[in-house]
Image: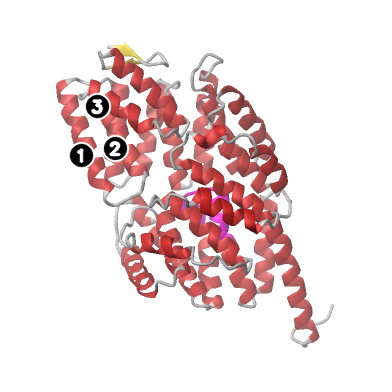
Amino acid sequence: MRNDQFGYEMTVSSPVAAQAWDRMVLAFLAHAASTPEHLGMVLKEAPDFAMAHAVKGMFFLMLGRRELMETAQEAYSAALAGAQRITPNEREMGYVRGLCAWLAGRPSETIHEMEAILARWPEDAMAMKISHATRFILGDGKGMRASVEAVLPAYDAKHPARGYLFGCHAFTLEETGEYSRAETAGRLGLSLSPDDAWGLHAMAHVFDMTGNARAGLSWLDGREHAWAHCNNFRYHVWWHKALMHLDQGEIDVVFDLYDTEIRSDRTDDFRDISNGSALLMRLELEGINVGDRWEELADISERRTEDACLVFADLHYLMALIGGERTEAVKRMMARLQRDARTTTADEMKARLATPGLSAATGLEAFGEGDYKTAFLNLGRARRSMQLAGGSHAQRDVFERLTIDSAIRGGFLDDAEVILQERLTQRAGRLDAYASARFDLIAESKGDWKQAGRLPAE
C-alpha cells in the first residue's frame, strides 16, 4: 500500500505506479497531452489497480463518441477483474461505481459518487475534477460552483492541486455571473499553477462575458505556454482568442487562427468540431464568406449522425452539415433525433434530446433552409433550456445569436430586442460588437417599417 500526493491510501505496491498516478492526476488537471502516457504507465506497473481502470473508462466516456462506449465498458470489466485480485478501498470503489453509473446512462449518479468521495476525502483533486467535468457536460453551472466551494477550505498552501482548484473555481464563478471574483480566482490559480489552461481559459470567458475583447487579447498574448502543453483543449483556447479578434473586426486574424491553430490538425473530436462550426457560423452571421472551410467539418460530421452520445455534440455536427449543405445527411440526422426524442429512456443524455435538443435542431435546420420564422419559433422554444445541452455560456452563444438573427430576419423585431436585452444583462451590461450591430439593425428596421406605415409613429 502507498499513499498518493494528497496523503490518501492507494492499493498499489509499485513506487513507479504510485508516482505515475500522481503525475497523471496533475496532468489531467492541467489538460496536458501527457495524461494518457502517465495512465498507461500506472496500468503497466499495476494492472489490477481498479481505480486506474475506472478513471480510464470515464476519460473515454467524456470524449462523447459512440464507438468508445465499448472501450469504456472494457475498462469497467478490467476494473472489476482487478478488484477480484486486489480488493480496492472504499474511495477507489467509488470511482468504479461512478464508471458503472455513467455506462448505464446515469452520469448524475457518477457525480453523486464523486461527491461522496469528496465528503470523506476532500483533497482528492481527481474526484473534484471529474465531478466538475461531468457537471459541465450536463450544464450544471451552479452545481459545479457548489462542489468546488465545498472543498476549498481543505486545499491549503501546501496542496499540490491548489492552483488548479482555483482555476475551476474561477470558471464556476464566471458561469454563475460573478465576473470580478472569477478574475481574482483565475489570476491566483495561474500564479500557483502556470500551466493551468482551464484557469487561463476561465479568464478568457470573463473577458468574453464582459465585452472586453481587447483586454482579453492583451491577457492571452505572451501566455501561450499555459496551453501549449495541452491535449486538444489547446484548440479551444485558440478559439477564444479568435472570438476576441472577431469582436474587434479583425477577420484576417480570425481566419489565420482557424487555419493554423483551431483546425490545423483536422481532428474529429466533437469539441474540436464545435469550435470550428461555432466560429464559422458566427462569421457567416456577420456576412463573411468562409470559403470551403465547412467541407472538412461536414465530412467528419456525416460519419457522426448516429452517435447520440451528447446533445451538444449532435447540434454542432448538425450545424456543420447545414454549413456544408449536406442535405441528405441533415435529413438522416433529423430523423434519428426525432426518433430518439420520442423514445422513453432512462439514459439521461438521450432524455435531453427532446428538450432542448430537438427544438434546437429543428431551428437549425430551418435556418439553413432560410425559413426564419420556423427557425425563430424553434430556437426560441429551446433557448430557455439550452443549458441542459451542456457547454459554457460562450459556447452556447452561437445558438443565442442564431435565435436573435432568426427573429430579425423573420420580422420578430420586438422579440429580438428582448433577447438582446437579456443577453446584455447576462453580460454585465457591456455591449459587444455583435449586440451593438443588432440593436442598430433593429432600430433601422423599425424606422423603415414606420415610414412604410407598418408601425405607428411615436
Q: Which quadrant is home to the C terminus? A: bottom right
Of 262 and 122, which appears nearest the observer? 262
Decide: marks 2, 1 in contact (CB < 8 A)? yes
Across and down, in percent, residue 339 comes to 31, 67
Point out the stretch of residues depicted in magenta.
Answer: 384-400
Residue 180 at x, y = what percent?
69, 36
For image coordinates 57% across by 27% down, the residue present is: 194
Asked whether 416 or 30 is in front, the reply is 30
Residue 184 drawn above or below residue 344: above
The colour mode here is secondary structure
User: Where is mark 1, residue-wise?
Assistant: 74
Secondary structure at badge 1 equals: helix
- Secondary structure of the residue carrying tag 2 is helix
Residue closest to the far right: 458
Question: Is 283 left, or right, of 355 in this rendering?
Answer: right
State the residue at coordinates (73%, 51%).
429
Total number of numbered labels?
Answer: 3
Relative side of 253 to 33, left or right: right
Please tell me which residue is depicted at 50% across the width and 25% down the height of the picture: 151
Which one is earlier in the sequence, the residue at label 3 or at label 1?
A: 3
**Residue that numbered label 3 is attached to:** 50
Residue 250 in view: yes
Residue 232 magenta-highlighted: no
Quadrant of residue 361 in the image? Answer: bottom left
Q: Which mark is residue 57?
A: 2
